[in-house]
Image: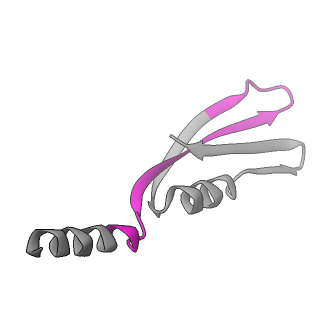
Amino acid sequence: MKTTFLTLIALSALAFSSCKKPYTCQCTVTVIETGFPDEVYTTSTTINNTKKKAKAACEGLNSSTEFFGIKQTAVCGIR
């Protein structure tokens, strides 16, 4: 009986935990300027959250900008 009660408490604690883990968000950034070779580099950061929220936050970093003929795009995803 005591073992069953302790098992139920342990399972309840697991059920209500948020399962936050560190996820690596990696972005590939491409810079395109007319007349120059394309520059491609990567950057990464760690997001501590649930997988669903970490993925949404990481994909929220996707961007595309253009300024004076220089175009920069960033494509991000959980790795």
Which residue does the image show at 62% across and 61% down from the upper left? 57
Q: Position of residue 70 (x, y in %)?
A: 83, 43
Q: From this viewpoint, which residue is outermost toward the left? A: 2
Q: Is residue 31 left or right of residue 50?
A: right
Which residue does the image show at 24% across and 75% down from the upper left? 9
Task: Determine the image quadrant of residue 30.
Answer: top right
Query: Quarter holding the N terminus?
Result: bottom left
The correct choice, above or below, for 48 with respect to 29 in the image is below
Q: Which residues are magenta?
A: 14-40
Q: From this viewpoint, which residue is outermost toward the front? A: 1
The correct choice, above or below, for 59 with respect to 19 in the image is above
Does the magenta portion include 46? Answer: no
Q: Is residue 9 left or right of residue 63?
A: left
Q: Is residue 20 left or right of residue 29?
A: left
State the residue in front, 66 or 63: 63
State the residue in front, 62 or 17: 17
Q: Position of residue 45 (x, y in %)?
A: 47, 53
Which residue does the image show at 59% across and 54% down from the upper left? 55
The correct choice, above or below, for 44 with respect to 8 in the image is above
